[in-house]
Image: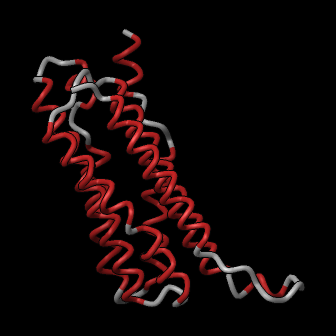
Amino acid sequence: MHKGRLEAFSDGVLAIIITIMVLEMKVPHSSDLGALQAILPIFGGYVLSFIYVGIYWNNHHHLFQAVKHVNGAVLWANLHLLFWLSLLPFASGWMGENHFAKWPVAVYGLILIMAGAAYYILVRVLLAGHGPESTLAKAIGSDRKGTISLVIYAVGIALAFVHPIIAFAIYSIVAVIWLIPDRRIEKHLAS
């Protein structure tokens, strides 16, 4: 199968996720700047979630530049990833509305770890279909950054029950780690 439809569908779903997240932020009913203070927690969750969706979109785009074809397993693995990402607006809103309480922050982390695991599964399914000598396999390598991220998410989830704000900060650190674009695929495609 050609990969174009999968990419277009994924782009559309990610655009809808971002749209839903921004629509969850309610406009204050007062015109003074102090009214914005009440929505700061919601805005903070939105910013981090927007960054995460952007990171996944960017990495998904780079990943599929090295992909030659897709099959049914890839389609399902991709839907699995999109499922977890589609829960970000809910978790982000719940976390912000409750001022970073422990359960919403833990659930947010759970969604992040599940999205990370789903991305890992997607990569493994793609690698299985392209072989160990493919450009994709050479570009992906060991993927230490992905594995380390899952461990950091797990630490954040555990900390959410002790210090939710520290857990949120840990989730933010993982985002900062991934903000630096992964150039492995670009390097292998250029050579």
Residue shown at 42% from the left, 67% from the top: 88
Q: Specify whether 13 is left or right of 48.
A: left
Q: Specify whether 187 is left or right of 83.
A: right
Where does residue 91 sit, x and y in percent of width and height? 42, 76
Residue shown at 34% from the left, 33% from the top: 63
Q: Specify whether 81 is left or right of 76.
A: right
**Nearest the camera: 121 or 30?**
30
Q: Residue furthest right?
A: 32
Q: Specify whether 106 is left or right of 44.
A: left
Residue 104 image-quadrant placement: bottom left
Residue shown at 47% from the left, 70% from the top: 89
Where does residue 14 sit, x and y in percent of width and height? 46, 52
Q: Is residue 23 depicted above or below 83 in this figure?
A: below
Q: Is residue 107 depicted above or below 79 in this figure?
A: below
Residue 46 image-quadrant placement: bottom right
Where does residue 5 sit, x and y in percent of width and height? 34, 34
Chosen colour scheme: secondary structure
Query: Which quadrant: the N terminus?
Result: top left
**Nearest the camera: 128 or 86?**
86
Q: Residue furthest top?
A: 191
Where does residue 94 sit, x and y in percent of width and height? 47, 83
Query: Which quadrant: the C terminus?
Result: top left
Residue shown at 54% from the left, 59% from the top: 18
Report the number of numbered marks.
Answer: 0
